[in-house]
Amino acid sequence: MATVETNAAPIPEAKSFAPERPKMGVVFWTSVSWILLVIAAAVLADLLPLRDPDALGIRTGEIQRFESPGVNAWFGGDGQGRDLFAQIVHGARPAMVLSAAVTLIGGSLGVLIGVVAGYVRGRTDAVIMGIAEIMFAFPAIVLLFAVGAIWGITMAILIPVMAVLAVPSYARIVRGVTIAVAERDFVDAARAMGASQSRVVIKELLPLVALPAIAFGFLGFGLVIATEGALAFLGLGLEQRTWGSLIAGGQGLIREAPHLALIPATAMFLTIMAFNYVGDGVRELIDPRPIVVGRKRRADGPRPTTASASDALLSIRDLRTSFPTPGGVVTAVDGVSLDVRTGRTLGVVGESGSGKTMLLRSITGAFPVVGVQREGRVVVDGTDLLSASPASRSAMLGNEIGVISQNPLSALNPVRTVGSQLVEVMRVHRAISKAAARARAIELLEQVGIPRPGRRVDMYPHQLSGGMQQRVTIAIALANEPRLLLADEPTTALDVTIQDQILRLLASLGDEYNMAVVLVTHDLSVVRGWADDVAVMYGGQIVESGPTSAVFGDPQHRYTQALLESTPRLDLPIHSRLAAIEGQPPSLVAPPAGCRFADRCAGADERCRSEVPVLERLGSVEFRCWHPGQGEAR
Amino acid sequence: MAGTGSAHLRTGDDIVLRVRDLVVEFPAGKGQVVHAVSGVSVDVAQGETLGVVGESGCGKTTLGRAVMRLQDARSGSVEFRDHELTGLEGSELARKRRDMQMIFQDPVSSLNPRRRVRDLVREGLEIWGSQPGPFTDARVEEIMEAVGLGGEGVGERRPHEFSGGQCQRICIARALVMDPEVLILDEPVSALDVSVQAQILNLLEDLKADFGLTMVFVSHDLAVVRNVSDRVMVMYLGKVCEVADTQPLFDTPAHPYTRALLASIPGHELGLSDASTLISGELPSPIEPPSGCRFRTRCPLATNRCAVEEPELREVAVGQFVACHYA
Amino acid sequence: MKLLGRLIVRLVAVAIAVSLATFSLLSAAPGDPAAAKAGFAATPERVEEIRSELGLNDPFHVRYADWVTGVVQGDFGTSVLNEQPASKLIGDAMPHTVELMILAQVIALAVSIPAGIYSAQRPNGWFDRLTGAMSFGMLATPAFVLGIYLAFIFAVRLEWLPAVATDLPGPFDDPVENLRQLILPALTLAAGMIAIYVRLLRTDLIETLQQDFVLMAQSRGYSRRRVLWRHAFRPSAFSLLTAAGLATAGLLGGALIAETLFAVPGMGRLAVTAIFTEDYDVVMGVVLLLSLAFVIANFIVDALYAVLDPRVRHGNR
């Protein structure tokens, strides 16, 4: 085979993409040690230099009746002067054997059943889960109790019964995981390659299901210990000495000799706790979902300033937005300044990670992560939102500033009607009666092109199509006739014919209400078609901005040129080769020293890598590039 | 459209894949069915790239999955090199299917996160019984090189260490290692950024030439489809609207829906009137699709005839087939 | 109502499955209820007489059918011990258990909802860590161990509360004394649930607080309180609700322990006594009613779901 000329991207260092493996803390390792200790006690009890747990201390005089814990007998003695410490060590074995057997047998059965139910689905699944549901309905401890009372409690009876009782829990958890995993494309991909069903289950599904099952197994292990204890407590202990039987025996003597119940109870508690903790740790291994630590703090910016110099409605100056992540502090927006005048639409365009969405969020201050810090100024109609008081900020948001987000379904509260969400935004911000607000809501729905608004007003978001949902979020944004509209990828989730409807609507409403509009998108054609001005973002900065026709007609920045040339176009010959941009976007934790695009730029030199380009102006276009305007105009 | 018919099917030895009257339906509960694909016919010639475009719910993805037999068809036939695939089961199906491979939309979700890249790429060979050894190792190495994943230690890493574009390269390598004749690509670049999208599209064009591949390229993005396809099929609500070579389809779109789709592209300069005059309203339910022509509820040209009589595909210009009474 | 139809089908299915299982289990038991009833001194003839009187010689299906016929008419059989109808024993015990379970559920929700909400607002803050650690501890404490701790601290050491609830007055006769006696068993029952509820609510709420519609509510200038209660809380409460339904099964098991430990004259203790005395009619009745209670509790959860979540109401989820 001929070697193929490819435009291979350099493979990044492994660590840059690898998620942080969570570090197991002291408690985790203490728990592991405790479990090992208990296991050692269970295995080695006979070999350890302990007193005979059955030796009656009051006869030998070694231990007094109800002797308190002390140097002589660490955990004290019981009514016959038997050594409690020795009893506890010896009592570890039955619980460990029982739990291990139940967890292994019940767990593996449950995993098998769960994987099959989750993968095959359909009738098999329904039957299995139906049986499981009935088993859940049956109070397990009552059944165990009945079985125990009738046949007596022995290992031979307890192990199979408890294993069977454990199966549904494992099956249910594993089924859930399997369904989630099987929905992913790699199962289809394997089948498309010709993999058999059993291969899919064994090679693709089982390895992914194993860890959650093991994590649950640790919890289940603790549960078996507790259940055995409960049975012993109810008078149905194993014939062996167990912690449960020790607790049960001591419980009646809680006034005379509290240590007899409390010490074995504590041993059991610590053991279960250790198993739970290890299980939890294993679960975190699979699902590292770090919650970013930190607390919302407002940067000590300058005091509220009055109107900015320009006549812009929105004026952003030196905005810097950063937040902590496990990999370091990400500066998502790094020194952005821009103006939007009334009646104009600014398109903010960039690829993922360029900071365009964070820029928009920095205006409203609603972030999906905690610990976000903003610096600079965001002045809307004379008020700096960053330094304004919370009350005056709230009065601006939703009132003077309307927001539309990317996914209309998730942007609407799923459990409240369209009407109530519209009425809410009006009544929070202005004195208006419920009835008047509702009438206005219907009017608004009509205005955004929703047919039969009188009926739709009482519907829930999920009852509407995606296009209709986006019209509703637009209606909410417009309810208080804002002067500034912020739209974050408002049509990305929509089909192209619906996208046209929505963009057309936004354009006509923008004219009608005479708003300033910020339209964030990754789609160059949306900007080309619908924005007056454009700001191109890369690595958290605006690299080029100006009137859309000027920027797209004669791009100055090398990135803008490359972006335009990598986009398939309708006016080029078919099968034309696209100019791909090699490499990856820059890190926002430790950005490159000079121009952020330098590493991927064909025309970059030493200066680009070391010196930050200064802002230059060519006609109405501003850009930051050391070697501008050398691409062909498009 | 929303029409049926097979006037556009070609004859000749170079037809690799031929789909005839394919019908795919899903149960939707309460005895209802979703009419996902309703009588679609299409063929693909050796070395050709067929673009399949349409909006969500048009059946383009289902069509690809049904051809791969990831989805069972209710009726109709899929022929690969004149061998009927429908009805084949088990190993016989698997053997035939080996010559067709599929690439999915979400490259990250297409890769089992617990496995190493080398094993992922080798998997297909393993399924087909190749023992691990110098031969398969060399083959895997060669393919990884070809998709731009060559280099020390790349094969030892796991998918999460790669970006979306690189994951899509891995997926392409997995398919290529099987030495397929046909590659079915379901929205292969939709999840990627523009610059990465260009990398993958260029790679696909290179591979097509070097490996002599035939492709079915399913996408909602008209500009992308235009750039990679030799022939394009436009679908709407489970039916074919228009099939034509790429150039005439984009230069002189004949079906009202094709025109509406093209006019909806923001900032286009195709000389079409506003999309708002070419299409109205929203997609009807695929559970109860309109009678006759399925596009009639949104079509400015629709008349009573469209409700009663389903248009069949007919040739309106050389190589351009349209299912519309008024095109 | 379709929902009601589904409930009845489920109730009947569970009733048949559970009663058949219990019935066959008890039939296979080696003990002889006839002998137990006859007493130690009875002659074999007398035992045989009682056996046929009780219908113990009939084949399995006849005895099961007899029992079902009786249950449908409200007759759960007769306790072999004191000749009282089983239905009366169960009827006397049931209110105490129901009260105990409701009390435990109320305590659990009253503690966990504020705690969960407060933790979720400041993830990894001191309160969140504290509740996290405490839930973890409570989750690892078996009910009987916790009961012993509670009894030791509050009854033995501090002597604030009674250690047993043997002469439990009705909740309406002497509410204060009734509460005094039930508070320890109810706490014993509630602890495990609190742990589960807090963790669930916290996780869900943290997730909801990051969702688009909450961010949108914030960016409309709504107050913190409004965002939390009017937007975030309801969608976050669904798993809590499910957990509360499923916890009923745990409550039933826990009632056995708590009632035994604190000598509450409820169904759990009745079951324990009945099993030890081979009083099988009572056992059957208790097990059946407990299982049905579980089904009904989960039905109520399903119904609440439909009220709270329109997506369920419209069958979209």
Image (spheres, coloured by chain):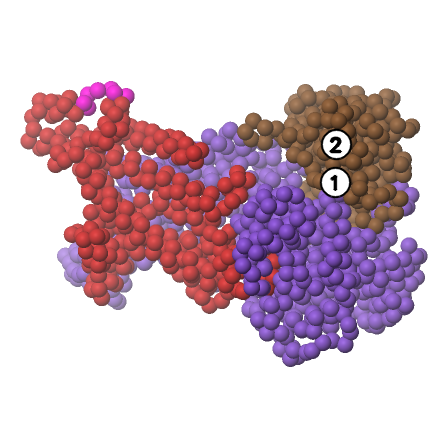
Which structural element holds mark 1?
loop
Query: Marks 1/2: CA distance?
Result: 10 Å
Would you place residue B137 above or below residue A332 in this image? Answer: above
Residue A3 x, y percent position in the rendering: 86, 43
Residue C168 x, y percent position in the rendering: 18, 52
Mark 2 chain? B
Which structural element holds mark 2?
helix
**10 Å crowding of disc 2: few (<14), some (14-19), many (20+):** many
Chain identifier matching the brown colour in the rendered picture = B
User: Magenta stretch?
Assistant: C55-62
**10 Å crowding of disc 1: few (<14), some (14-19), many (20+):** some
Would you place residue A254 above or below residue C34 in this image? Answer: below
Q: Chain A takes which shade in the image?
A: purple
Q: Which residue is mark 1?
A: B280
Q: Which residue is mark 2?
A: B296
Question: From where the camera sits, is residue A601 visible?
Answer: no
Q: In the picture, residue A151 is in which quadrant?
A: top left
Q: Main secondary structure of the magenta part?
A: loop
Q: Of the residues shown, which amino acid type is indicated by label 1?
A: Ser
| Quarter of the N terminus of chain C within the rendering | top left
Residue at the farthest bottom position: A303
